[in-house]
Image: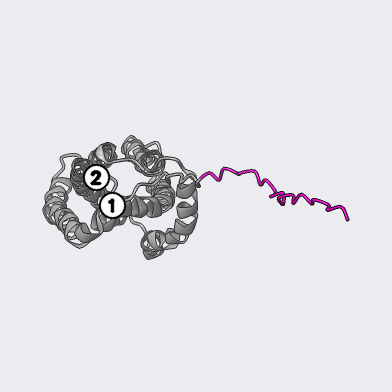
Amino acid sequence: MESISLETVAPLAPKIPQIAISEPTVVPTSTPSPAVLKKNAIRISLRGSTVDGVFAAMFSMTTTGILLSNFLVELNASPVTVGMLSSIPMLVNLLQPLGAYLSECATSRFRYSLFTNATARLLWLFLAIGIAALSFGYINSQQLIVLTLVIVLLSHMLAGLGNASWLSWMAVLVPRQLRGRYFGLRNSAASLTNLIYVPLVGMAVSKWPGGTLQGYGVLVLFGILSGLMSIGCQYFMVDV
């Protein structure tokens, strides 16, 4: 009997091509956290924001509160008009959600603040022009009252659109462990400014040679300048 030799064939192992798996790329967000920002940049930003608060307080006290109410009383405004003046700031707070959405669509907090807040403050130039027109007899007191209410409404609407953006901006710039101390210092500086500013400008308006209306018109120009200087201080803050 002849023997038959059998050759064993090694099993073929399937060749599986190696697939290179790339690691996911992490794309940094456009808004850095306070830990990412340099300490020097944070320090300069906080100083700029503090000075911003001082000038903003001067503008705010010029265009709101007792000075503006006294101006309307000098124009013989009715109690309804004074009530409307007090209700406008609370009414426009309803625009803050819209302002938050628009600020998220913007690529720069500084440019968004420049558009909303600077425009809101420049609107008060029309009131100074209106006071001058009243002095020369081009308009009457009732027309100036209506102009004042329109300016207050538009100015607060624009400011309401910018409030949420400013708060989110400061949340990025101020480190968590410094927020309480910093905002306490900033608010104290603004309150001290109000304490000194209101009596001084109130006395200046009451003793103005051309009368209280003209004195308030000059004060409005000074308030607009203070408001623009407040916006200028934001230039030194890190933009996000």
Give left or right: position of 49 versus 239.
Answer: left
Q: Where residue 216 is drawn, which disc sits there?
A: 2
Earlier residue among tags 1 and 2:
1
Most common secondary structure along the magenta stretch:
loop
Q: Is residue 42 left or right of residue 110?
A: left
For badge 1, the amino acid type reads Phe
Magenta stretch in the rendered image:
1-22
Indicate yes or no whether the magenta region holds residue 18: yes
Residue 75 appears in the figure: no
Give yes or no for contact between labels 1 and 2 (Cβ–Cβ under 8 Å): yes
Q: Position of residue 50 (x, y in %)?
A: 19, 48
Q: Is residue 93 visible?
A: yes
Q: Which label sits on residue 71?
A: 1
Identify whether 23 is placed above or below 167: above
Residue sitting at x 31%, y 38%: 135
* Quadrant showing the C terminus: top left
Give the SS element for disc 2.
Answer: helix
Whether 227 is drawn above or below 83: the answer is above
Instruction: Using the image as rendered, state which of residue 230 and residue 124 is in the foreground.
Output: 230
Front-most of 22 and 222? Answer: 22
- Residue at image coords 35%, 36%: 129
* Residue at x 71% of width, y 50% of height: 10
Q: Is residue 62 magenta?
A: no
Residue 92 in the figure: left or right of residue 69: right
Question: Is the residue marked by circle 2 packed among few (<14), some (14-19), or many (20+) residues within 10 Å?
Answer: many
Amino acid on which disc 2 is placed: Tyr
